[in-house]
Image: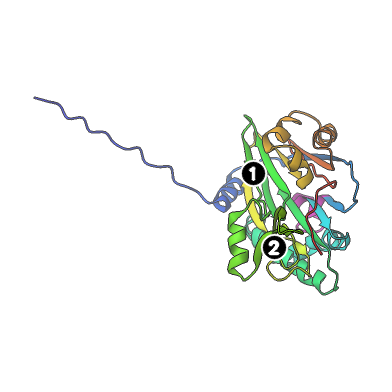
């Protein structure tokens, strides 16, 4: 008699929301917060890049146990006013969108929506000034082992974890490289095309018209139409206690380096040295940060960037 073998499929693991994981950690574990060390280096020509370093923010003023850190890069174009305005106002606008008197778990769950609201409010307030410059923004909030990243434009934030796995935490809003953004712009009534020169030849990257900006999302840029929006891409991740390294850079670095090469260039190095080496490799502006205990985090950027902006 032949034997019939019955194979059973292994059940798929249940996916658990990030907020639930954070809640479990708060209720069942007492994990010390990582110690943050940071540094920056620069090789700038235009001087339109600005950065924000606030490692000692507090959800409840006067209570060190509620501390969190903010690191941000603002890559301006067509002037510096939008980058400066965002640097001075974005954080307050984000925090004002979070309900008062809530615990850490609820605060972290509310943070992604607050980041969207803060970006939009900052853009509206800047437009009321009547100026036409614009800026990309990469905005990182670190609370314990939870990292939340919001970005508009073509800066990039990568996570390099133990074992050399590199993950992208941002979305590139260059029209040349983002088909979904091209579809959004055209569906809204905008035009996407290259610059026409004498003789009908098309040159340069894809741009949004009117205005000719090669980005689809930014803060400012009031003279390029309603198709350029300030709504950021937001991603929230929780690092394991094995740690990891963040690299945040404006487009100039990534025009010269791939994500993998950027991560490899500063693995295992102190923050200041890592930032300098990334600057050297990318020939630009670098902003470095480390998370210790035991993770590592580094943030580079560059201001010597190629801009495809047509007034």
Residue 122 appears at what percent x and percent y? Answer: 78, 67
Residue that badge 2 annotates: 208
**Identity of the residue drawn at 71% across and 55% down:** 201
The part of the chain drawn in magenta is: 54-71
View extreme (top): residue: 1
Callout in the foreground (2, 1): 2
Q: What residue appears at the point 47 percent right and 47 percent down from the top-left corner? A: 15
Q: Which circle marks residue 299 in the picture?
A: none
Query: Residue 89 appears in which quarter of the rendering?
Result: bottom right
Up/down of 2 relative to 217, above or below: above
Estimate how packed mark 1 is, as few (under 14), some (14 to 19) or many (20 or more) residues with alpha carbons within 10 Å: some
Q: What is the quadrant of the C terminus in the image?
A: bottom right
In the image, 182 versus 288, the foreground residue is 182
C-alpha span from label 2 to label 1: 25 Å
Q: Residue furthest front?
A: 199
Give the labeled residue for mark 1: 168
| Whether residue 230 can be seen here | no
Tell me residue 241's x, y (percent).
Answer: 65, 36
Among the 4 quarters of the image, the one containing residue 207: bottom right
Q: In this view, does 153 lie above or below 29?
A: below
Q: Do the residues labelled 2 and 1 touch (CB within 8 Å)?
A: no
Quadrant housing the N terminus = top left
Q: Is residue 183 magenta?
A: no
Name the colouring of the figure: rainbow
Write the residue at 60% across / 66% down.
186
């Amino acid at each position: 008699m032949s034997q019939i073998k019955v194979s059973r499929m292994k059940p798929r693991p249940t996916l658990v929301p990030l907020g639930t994981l954070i809640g479990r950690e708060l209720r069942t574990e007492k994990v010390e917060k990582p110690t943050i060390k940071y540094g920056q280096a620069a090789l700038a020509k235009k001087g339109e890049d600005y950065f924000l370093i606030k490692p000692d923010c507090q959800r409840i003023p006067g209570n060190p146990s509620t501390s969190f850190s903010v690191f941000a890069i603002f890559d301006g174009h067509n002037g510096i006013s939008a980058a400066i305005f965002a640097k001075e106002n974005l954080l307050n606008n984000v925090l004002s969108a979070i309900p008062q008197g809530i615990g850490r778990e609820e605060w972290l769950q509310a943070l992604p929506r607050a980041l969207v609201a803060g970006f939009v409010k900052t853009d509206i307030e800047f437009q009321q000034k009547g100026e036409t410059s614009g800026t990309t923004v990469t905005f990182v909030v670190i609370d314990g082992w939870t990292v939340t990243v919001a970005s508009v434009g073509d800066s990039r934030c990568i996570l390099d974890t133990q074992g050399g796995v590199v993950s992208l935490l941002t979305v590139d809003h260059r029209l040349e490289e983002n088909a979904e953004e091209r579809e959004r712009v055209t569906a809204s009534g905008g035009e996407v095309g290259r610059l026409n020169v004498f003789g009908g030849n098309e040159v340069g990257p894809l741009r949004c018209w009117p205005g000719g900006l090669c980005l689809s999302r930014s803060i400012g840029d009031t003279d390029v139409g309603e198709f350029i929006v300030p709504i950021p891409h937001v991603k929230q991740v929780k690092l394991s206690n094995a740690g990891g390294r963040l690299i945040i850079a404006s487009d100039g670095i990534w025009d010269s380096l791939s994500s993998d090469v950027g991560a490899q260039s500063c693995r295992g190095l102190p923050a200041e040295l890592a930032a300098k080496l990334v600057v050297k490799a990318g020939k630009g502006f670098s902003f470095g940060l480390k998370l210790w205990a035991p993770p590592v985090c580094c943030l580079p950027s560059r201001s010597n960037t190629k801009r495809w902006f047509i007034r």
